Amino acid sequence: MKMKDVTKAMPILLLCASVIACGSTTFNKQNDEVTAVEEAVFTPTSYRSTGLDFTQAAENTVNAVVSIRTTTVAQSRGGGFNDPFLEFFFGPGYNQPRQQQPQSGLGSGVIISQDGYIVTNNHVISGADKLEITLNDKRTFNGRVVGADPTTDLALVKIEAENLPTVRMGNSDNLKVGEWVLAVGNPFGLTSTVTAGIVSAKARRISGNMNQGRLDIESFIQTGAAVHTGNSGGALVKTAGELVGINTAIFSQTGNYAGYSFAIPSSIVSKVIGDLREYGAVQRAVMGVMFQEITADFAKSKGIDVLEGVYVAQVNDRSAAMEAGIVEGDIITAINGVKISNGATLQEQMSKFNPGDKITVTINRGGKTEVKSLILKNSQGGTEVTKAVKFNSLGAGFKELTDAQKKELNTRNGIEVVGLKDGKFKSAGIREGFVILEVNNVPITSVSDMEPLFDQITHSSGSRKVMFITGIYPNGKVMYYAVDLSD
């Protein structure tokens, strides 16, 4: 099972892994006494009489939530073609495919357009060789990944169908703590399951302390709606039937649902999925600051008399923040007038913008309030839109590494493989998220480096046209691949 850990004692579980049995809970009432208040809460008629009728929201949602069954085949490290040259470099038997053992997984998805676009979690589809999409009416389709964004754990999948039921996108910014919501998904492979709960918190980060300005975006909606294995990628909707989140993780020490679940807010979903559909890559805007959460101890050590906002720990050279006059020690308290209480709310607000957008940033500097105007940039320091470059025969797209990814991988160069589908890369054993460092001993510093190398290899005079790739996976494992570009 994949999981995120808050601490070793408090694991957060992603919801699309292997099936785990769910324990039952019995509510014991002494002497079988049930008070009038309890009756008002628990009887079905009281829901209708008090306005808590979830039937319409459920009816409007279940048909637009799909089941996603993934199949992953353990790839051999060989390229699948007989070439003694490769065995010389990569060892005897490199060309011989190893035994493949398929593995399956379960998740959910939400149809967002009548022509078959479906939003789900990246961890549901990551590394999968086949996606089987089952609608609520039991029709089954093969799905293909349009694009994925590990930073927000979102992915866009497409099936070839028309006139499909959809869920209307809502505005999670208007969601209030204490408001009723419904979780709709396919736990344990059970279709069309609806559970209800209230919004427990917003802008919740669940993977521990903030990582000093990293681009990993976590600003979850925390709810009491029961979700389990297979719910990942399913819908979180308001009682009016509007989509306000994509269910992603649960809090659990046992693997079973323990009272809290977490969803990616629709404000992030709509931006990320819109970018993946239009550009194939997320247009992520940055201010160019490293920030620090403000705790009571931190505020005391810095002589700060406020506890809300985020502390600017570092300002990057030639960044939008530097150009606007933001300096180390400033406290960011609002973006475009929206209050920033912590790092999660800052990341959520920033995730809505594109490079080139102009925003206002309210800061506290030495107890005085100032407003700065910024023109946001992309991670490469420009304002232009970037697209994921795709070469049809490779069956993959590529995107630039963020500064945080380079730091994690301890590299100054490299590009990430995204949107993997059937093609030469997958046949060679390359997986989603692989970072290409070198091609034929040439360092790859940007996406633009790939096309001329691809053209050079495919137009070479030799009978065997091979792309020798050196790279690294996010877990730090270095791998070498030989991709045969011969027709």
Image (cartoon, helix red, strand yellow):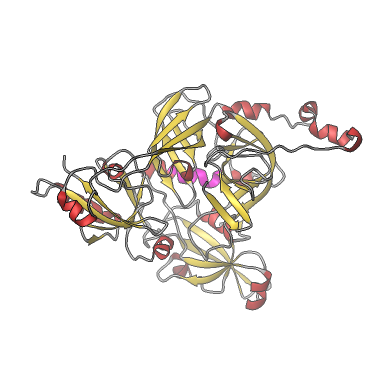
**Which corner quadrant holds the C terminus?**
top left
Q: How far across and how far down the image is residue 337, in percent? A: 59, 57
Between 65 and 249, the one nearer to me in the picture: 249
Measured as percent of width and height from the top left, residue 256 is found at 63, 43
| In this picture, residue 250 sits left or right of residue 410 | right
Q: Is residue 270 magenta?
A: yes
Magenta residues, dominant SS class: helix
Query: Magenta stretch?
Result: 266-274
Residue placed most toward the observer, 205 or 165: 205
| Residue 319 to residue 28: above or below | below
Question: Looking at the image, is 335 positioned above or below residue 235?
Answer: below
Q: Is residue 229 above or below residue 337?
A: above
Residue 81, quarter of picture: top left
Residue 31 vs residue 307: left or right?
right
Left or right of 163: which side holds 246? right
Residue 248 in picture, x, y percent from top left:
56, 44
Residue placed farthest to the front in the image? 92
Q: Is residue 273 magenta?
A: yes
Residue 452 visible in the current orientation: no
The residue lying at 69 percent from left, 39 percent from top is: 197
**Residue 229 in which image quadrant:** top right
